[in-house]
Image: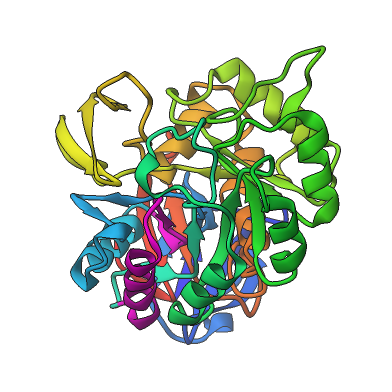
Amino acid sequence: MRITGGKVFSDGAFIDADVVVEGGRIAALEPAGTPETAGGEGDVLGVDGCYVVPGFVDIHFHGCMGADLCDAEPEALKEIARYEASRGVTSICPATMTYPEDRLSSIARIAAAFEPAEDEASLVGINMEGPFISPDKIGAQNPAYVQRCDAGMLRRVQEEAGGLVKLVDIAPEEPGAMEFVREVAAEVRVSLAHTCTDYETAREAFAQGARHMTHLYNAMPGLHHRKPGPIAAAWEAPEATVELICDGVHVHEAMARLTFGLFGESRICLISDSMRATGLEDGTYDLGGQDVTVRGNVATLADGTIAGSVTDLAACVQHAVASMGIPLEQVLTAATITPAKAIGIDAERGSLAVGKTADIVVLDADLNVRHVILRGKQIR
């Protein structure tokens, strides 16, 4: 396949080039207008006036189309992977909720056995959002299953997952959390989440090996000029990445712009945090065993707590640019190569580079998803 006529996003900028795909991989980025015979025989996809970008990488979401990773059912995972691929999210690292070990192990086994069909996104990891969080910053998690950090439990779940657990969330102020960070930081990326931590404790967690922050600003103390909190500690830890939800609900547009100004796109992982209601109509849905009411693009628990999003990552990209005023190049970086690097899959995915898996999305001038090439095959 040769993709011609579009603006190709490569190394953080747009270039005039043709993308040549062979055997499921990117074979070449050739100057625009290169004779088609140079790339061998194959289909030609003309995309004049469009953007040609890497497949999106979502490292934190729960489900869509009525399905959730925590359903621990093969068909639920396939439903998720099909929908995400159709929206240009070609690499998925869905998140668990706060559940006991036996339920997490069941989820892990289903994930380990998953083999994507031609129209299903690649499962590149699991984000273990619970249960090692603060009972006082529970958000939409189930308080009944919150527990202390347990390295043995993590390793048992990891074994069931076949190594798919890429992220594990903790509240660093909780008993045993700092020892947990020291013990597992070389095995999995530790993220600060659902936490009441102060600046000093968060800074120590980063010094001990934590390298990530989950859905920045949400379920954590905010920035304050006398109590800087964990966000300032993350900014001072140069190897730390942060997640940002740009659905127009979780984070105000001014704060989203501020975050890009502070951290830069090389440290921001754009995520959706989407739940099973994504892609469906308004109504009442389940998230982690709790009822969530969805009206428009807002999902809440009975007490009004925001409970995940109903906006997929492609729509978050569009909203970040069109409504928040963040430059397209920065947003694309945060939705592709930065999360790929955060979970260690950047050698294969996250950018349009020769030799990498041919996961490619074509966006029109308004950033709507027009075409999706998944592992070298056009599925949309």
Check the image and report above or below for 289 versus 255.
below
Q: Nearer the viewer, residue 20 or 239?
A: 239
When asked about the image quadrant of residue 326, the answer is: top right
When asked about the image quadrant of residue 355, the answer is: bottom right
Check the image and report above or below for 247 versus 361.
above
Which residue is at a point 53% across and 82% down the rendered structure image? 37
Check the image and report above or below for 195 versus 6.
above
Q: Position of residue 361 (x, y in %)?
A: 45, 57
Q: Is residue 141 left or right of residue 236?
A: left
Which residue is at a point 31% across and 36% down the rendered structure image? 310
Confirm whether residue 142 shows in the render.
no
Q: Is residue 53 left or right of residue 379?
A: right
Q: Classify the position of the N terminus by image quarter.
A: bottom left
Q: Is residue 94 magenta?
A: yes
Q: Nearer the viewer, residue 90 or 298?
A: 298
Range shown magenta: 88-116
Q: Classify the position of the C terminus by image quarter.
A: bottom left
Q: Is residue 301 magenta?
A: no
Q: Position of residue 152 (x, y in %)?
A: 57, 72
Confirm whether residue 42 shows in the render.
yes
Which residue is at a point 65% across and 21% down the rendered structure image? 222
Which residue is at a point 47% across and 52% down the rendered structure image? 131
- The furthest residue to the top: 225
Q: Nearer the viewer, residue 48 or 149?
A: 149
Q: Position of residue 240 (x, y in %)?
A: 76, 48
Q: Position of residue 194 (x, y in %)?
A: 54, 37
Check the image and report above or below for 71 versus 333.
below
When asked about the image quadrant of residue 255, the answer is: top right
